[in-house]
Amino acid sequence: MGAIGTVGSVVINVADYEGEKAFWMAFLDVGVAREFPGFCWLEPQHEGGISIALQGSPDPGPAMGRIHLDTAVADLDEAQSAIESLGGSHLEDHEIMGFRWKIMADPEGNRFCIAAEG
C-alpha cells in the first residue's frame, strides 16, 4: 500500500494570530505563502520542505489540540475511507473560499487534516 497522504505543514493553533505570525516569520526567516482570514501557511525554509501554518483560535487549548498535521491527498473521499479502514475516524468537513478539507483523527484521537492536492 502506498502513502495515503503527504505532510504539507505543521499547524499551530494560536490565540494571538498576528503576534504569532510575526514571531514565526522572524524566527524562520520566511514570508507568508498563502493566507485566509485567521489562517496562513508560511513559506517552507527550502524547496520541498514542510511549512508552519498558523490558525487563529479563541481557545487553542486541548479540545482542538495545539498542533496538528495538514496533509495532501489525491481524493478526499477515498482518503477518508482508507483512514477509517486503518482505525482512524472522520470528525468534520470544512470549506472556505472553495478550499475543502476534512478533519480526521488517528485511532487515539489525535487530529489531522486532509485536503485535496493542488
Image (tube, helix red, strand yellow):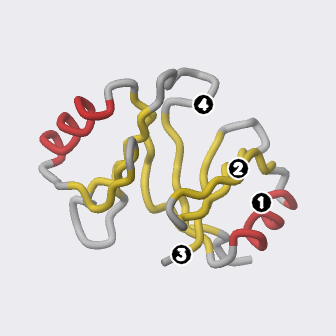
Q: Which comes before the other along the chain, label 3 or label 4? A: 4
In-image side of 80 versus 31 (left or right): right
- Residue found 59% across the figure and 22% down from its top: 62
10 Å crowding of disc 1: few (<14), some (14-19), many (20+) = some
Vertical position of residue 39 compared to residue 85: above or below = above
Q: Are marks 2 and 1 in contact (CB under 8 Å)?
A: yes
Vertical position of residue 110 compared to residue 94: above or below: above
Amino acid at dot 3:
Glu
* Mark 4 neighbour density, 10 Å: few (under 14) some (14–19) many (20 or more): few
**Residue bearing the label numbered 3:** 117
Identify the residue under disc 4: 64
Q: Amino acid at mark 4?
A: Met
Q: In the image, what residue occupies the spot 40% across and 46% down?
A: 39
Residue 54 screen position, x and y as percent: 37, 42
Q: CA distance from mark 1 to mark 3?
A: 16 Å
Task: Answer with mark 2 or mark 1, whichever residue precedes in sequence.
Answer: 1
Numbered disc 3: secondary structure: loop
**Residue occupied by mark 2:** 104
Sooner in the amino-acid sequence: mark 1 or mark 3: 1
* Mark closer to the observer (2, 1): 2
Residue occupying image coordinates x 25% and y 34%: 18
Q: Quadrant of the N terminus?
A: bottom right
**Which residue is denoted by mark 1 in the rendering?**
83
